[in-house]
Image (cartoon, grey):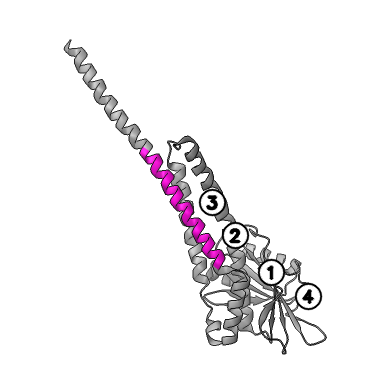
Amino acid sequence: MGSVPSDPAPPSSSSRAPTGEATFSFHSVAFVENLSLKELAPSFPEGRRTLREIRFRLPAGGEVFVYPFGAVSFMNVSAPERARAIARLRAARPNLSDPTVDGEQLTVRADPESHPGIDEGILRLDRMTPERANVIALTVAQSAAMEYYERIVEAMFGKTDRLVERLEARGTVSFSTKPLHRFIGAAIGTRNEVLSVLHLLDKPDEAWDDPELDRIYSELRAEFDLVDRYQALELKLRSVQEALELVLDVARDRRLVLLESSVVLLIVLEIAITFVRAH
């Protein structure tokens, strides 16, 4: 994944070196909650809303991209300005949690003599355009959101391992299946959320119209390992679901055996009572 200095200094739309090279810093954070762009739009009247994001420029310079899957990207926005933008978002979206991860970052350098490509974690372009900024901000935001899901799935995977180890050691599970039902529901819900993020990994419209941008998008996906990370998430979630279903089946079998034993005991008891009365 791309790694750059933690806090891009200039909050302007770009910074230029003496050679004419422009540098753009992208920073993304993710939240637990999804964001309704329709509900947020009135709080950001200066923003441009599409089906994919709300994009607006800050008075101090730099731009902000807000995405419905609970992530926000900043282009050339300093840490204090990022904090103010998040506070404004929190005012528009009450009870919004703190960012779930440290964030994802990427540096982009645009030089007319450069050939597009990623070199040592830095994306080099011949020029920056609004369309390219959209695609870069989206990809960095997707990576930040993916990191959030990776943490959730890793925790689920660890908890499932402990359940399976307990089953292996004891040969049985807890009599109550309610916690297992809740856990399976959480696993299915997380899987559905990950699938929704995968849908957002579809190629952006801008990439279809610009072959060079299409190549940039492909390199960004490879740099952040988005496809491989998603496939790893899917594999872990499938393993969690299958393991939980196995544990649930064992718990159900135990309850069934207990029920059958109770029925047999009641029959024996009834026969015994009938025999005693007869004598």
Name the front one of labels 1 and 3.
3
- CA distance separating discs 2 and 3: 14 Å
* Residue bounds of the magenta highlight: 228-253
Horizontal side of residue 166 vs 114, given as left or right: left
First in sequence, mark 4 or 1: give its number. Answer: 4
Compute the Cα span from label 4 to label 3: 41 Å
Q: Where is residue 93 in the image (x, y as percent from the top left)?
A: 59, 62
**Label 2 vs 3, first from the N-terminus:** 2
Q: Which amino acid does label 4 sit on?
A: Pro
Taking the view exactly as shown, the residue that stands out farthest to the right is 18
Position of 202 compared to 220: left or right?
A: left
Where does label 4 land, which residue? 10
Q: Which residue extends farthest left?
A: 278
Pointer 1: what residue?
A: 105
Contact (Cβ within 8 Å) of mark 1 with mark 2? no
Classify 259 as above or below 32. Answer: above
| Residue 47 in sight | no
Callout 3 amino acid: Phe
How many numbered marks, from 0 up? 4
Residue at image point 60% right, 86% down: 212
Report, in whole angstroms, how far the alpha carbon at label 4 lies from the one at label 1: 15 Å
Q: Is mark 1 on a helix, strand or loop?
A: strand
Mark 1 or mark 3: name the one nearer the start of the chain: 1
| Mark in front: 4 vs 3 | 3
At 27% from the left and 28% from the top, the residue drawn is: 264
**Residue 88 percent across, percent down from the top left:** 66, 66
Above-or-below relation of 44 to 178 = below
Asked if the residue at tag 3 contacts the one at tag 1, i.e. Cβ–Cβ closer than 8 Å, the answer is no
Q: Residue at x 19, y 13 (%)?
A: 277
The label shown at residue 157 is 3
Give the number of the disc on residue 148. 2
